[in-house]
């Protein structure tokens, strides 16, 4: 496959942009070579600047649950743009969006729109600290909640792929207030809260971890988090930036029947435009300015283009059978992968919740950061490059999720399973 143009653009980009990319996970650091520069995308397909075509299971890292450039979403954005791209003043669309989110997500009675997942989690943490008048927060190793200072400690996603456990530039006085625990370990949570529960403002968790690859919560884990935080007067924050509207309209909280105090959202609710949101009971949300004194603001928050795209996405998702079909297709794909791995004698551990899934190259059961870290990263690198060569675009790190979209066809799934069979053989050597 000729990728010369991407290669030369990457060289040029590195002269002007740090590492040639505007977000580190895109840089293909963990898999070698250079990233693809994308020319265009439609439905489940991507085309790079060299004219190569790929079936896409990255979906812009999750948001594009109806694939690229869905005609209804494109039309909604066009319509909105013709009426102005930003007003910095309220619009009716924002009420519609808030109502829809409140309707769908059990914990949310009031919601504030922001422009990224990072802003959503930063703001939710500030609110929790302001509400409880406590400083400490708890997060889990390998969970990623964006790049807010308090949250860059033992984080997942790009930090994990690049081996950056603690980020320089995050001042010690702040980092010391971030306590980290192993994911899926309820006993460790109980123990920590027993020791210092009265100092803890909140516990933030990806209810389905997606940033160390997909690691589902063990039975009872989320319930423990709910019980312990309630007992100690700390807020429970579900970071559903990935899982929100991905595993169902009500996100992971509906799926598992556990209601957090605050929820952060992003990705899918923006329909592929820059959006995040945080919400919860009015009791908490009324502490945000201008009602309360916890300050949070944004010039482009509730942007009309983003609201239009997001609302169209949520309308599409509300149609009957969407999640059932995603579930069936994802299962077919993962079953195919599993069979291939067994036949090829490649040790692999599979995880999947709805349409988010992972194939970990390890013979251990993957439940947390430590077990994820047993994966054979050299094997993944060879596997990734073989898949790319076969025209299948997956996330360029072992520690990221795969995403099925509503527009992937049965033929594409079959083609992907075949590519996987060959890629496993190639990677095995
Ligand atoms: N939380 C989670 C769970 C995420 O996966 C991400 C992004 N991958 C974020 C927060 C940050 O979102 P953004 O990249 O939009 O700032």
Image: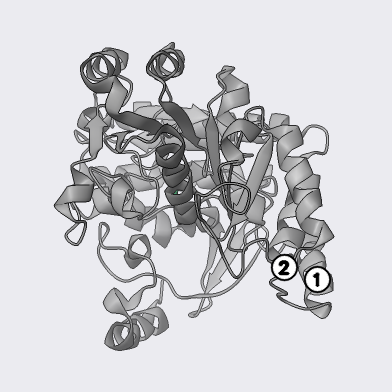
Image quadrant holding the N terminus, namely bottom left
Q: As displayed, is residue 197 above or below residue 13?
A: above
- Along the viewing direction, whichever of 355 and 53 lies nearer the viewer: 355
Q: As displayed, is residue 343 above or below residue 58?
A: above
The residue indicated by pointer 2 is: 305
Q: Earlier in the sequence, mark 1 or mark 2?
A: 1
Disc 1 is placed on an element classified as: helix
Image quarter of residue 305: bottom right
Q: Residue at x 20, y 30 (%)?
A: 370
- Along the viewing direction, whichever of 100 and 3 lies nearer the viewer: 100
Instruction: Residue 199: give x, y in percent of width and height.
Output: 28, 28
Instruction: Residue 78: give x, y in percent of width and height.
Output: 80, 73
Disc 2 is placed on an element classified as: helix
Cα distance in 3D space between marks 1 and 2: 6 Å
For residue 297, side relative to residue 142 (left or right): right
Q: Residue at x 32, y 67 (%)?
A: 27
Residue 381 seen in the current view: no
Instruction: Residue 265: give x, y in percent of width and height.
Output: 56, 45
Q: Are marks 1 and 2 in contact (CB under 8 Å)?
A: yes
The residue indicated by pointer 1 is: 80
Image quarter of residue 328: top right
């Amino acid at each position: 496959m000729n990728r010369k143009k991407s290669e030369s653009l990457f060289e040029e980009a590195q002269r002007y942009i740090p590492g040639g990319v505007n977000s580190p996970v895109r840089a293909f650091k963990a898999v070698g070579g250079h990233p693809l520069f994308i020319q265009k995308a439609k439905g489940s397909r991507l085309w790079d600047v060299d004219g190569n075509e790929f079936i896409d299971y990255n979906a812009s890292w999750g948001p594009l649950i109806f694939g690229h450039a869905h005609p209804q979403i494109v039309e909604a954005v066009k319509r909105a743009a013709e009426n102005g791209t930003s007003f910095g003043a309220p619009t009716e669309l924002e009420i519609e969006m808030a109502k829809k989110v409140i309707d769908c997500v059990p914990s949310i009675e009031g919601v504030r729109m922001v422009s990224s997942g990072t802003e959503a989690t930063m703001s939710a943490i500030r609110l929790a600290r302001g509400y409880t008048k406590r400083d400490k927060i708890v997060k889990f190793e390998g969970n990623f909640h964006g790049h807010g200072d308090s949250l860059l400690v033992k984080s997942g996603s790009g930090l994990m792929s690049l081996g950056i456990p603690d980020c320089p530039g995050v001042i010690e006085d702040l980092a010391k207030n971030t306590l980290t625990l192993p994911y899926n370990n309820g006993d460790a949570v109980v123990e920590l809260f027993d020791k210092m529960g009265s100092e803890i403002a909140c516990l933030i968790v990806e209810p389905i971890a997606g940033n160390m690859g997909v690691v589902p919560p063990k039975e009872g884990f989320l319930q423990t988090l709910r019980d312990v935080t309630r007992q100690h007067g700390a807020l429970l924050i579900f970071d559903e930036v990935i899982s929100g509207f991905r595993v169902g309209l009500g996100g992971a909280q509906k799926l598992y029947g556990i209601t957090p105090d605050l929820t952060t959202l992003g990705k899918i609710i923006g329909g592929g435009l820059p959006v995040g949101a945080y919400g919860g009971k009015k009791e908490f949300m009324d502490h945000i300015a201008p009602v309360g004194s916890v300050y949070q603001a944004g010039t482009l928050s509730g942007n009309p283009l983003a609201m239009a795209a997001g609302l169209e996405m949520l309308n599409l998702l509300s149609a009957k059978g969407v999640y059932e079909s995603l579930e069936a297709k994802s299962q077919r794909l993962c079953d195919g992968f599993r069979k291939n791995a067994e036949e090829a004698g490649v040790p692999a551990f599979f995880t999947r919740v709805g349409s988010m899934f992972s194939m970990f190259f390890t013979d251990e059961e993957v439940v947390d950061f430590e077990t994820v870290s047993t994966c054979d990263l050299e094997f993944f690198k060879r596997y990734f490059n073989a898949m790319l060569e076969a025209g299948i675009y997956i996330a360029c790190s072992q520690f990221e999720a795969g995403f099925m979209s509503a527009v992937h066809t049965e033929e594409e799934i079959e083609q992907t399973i075949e590519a996987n069979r060959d890629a496993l053989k190639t990677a095995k050597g």
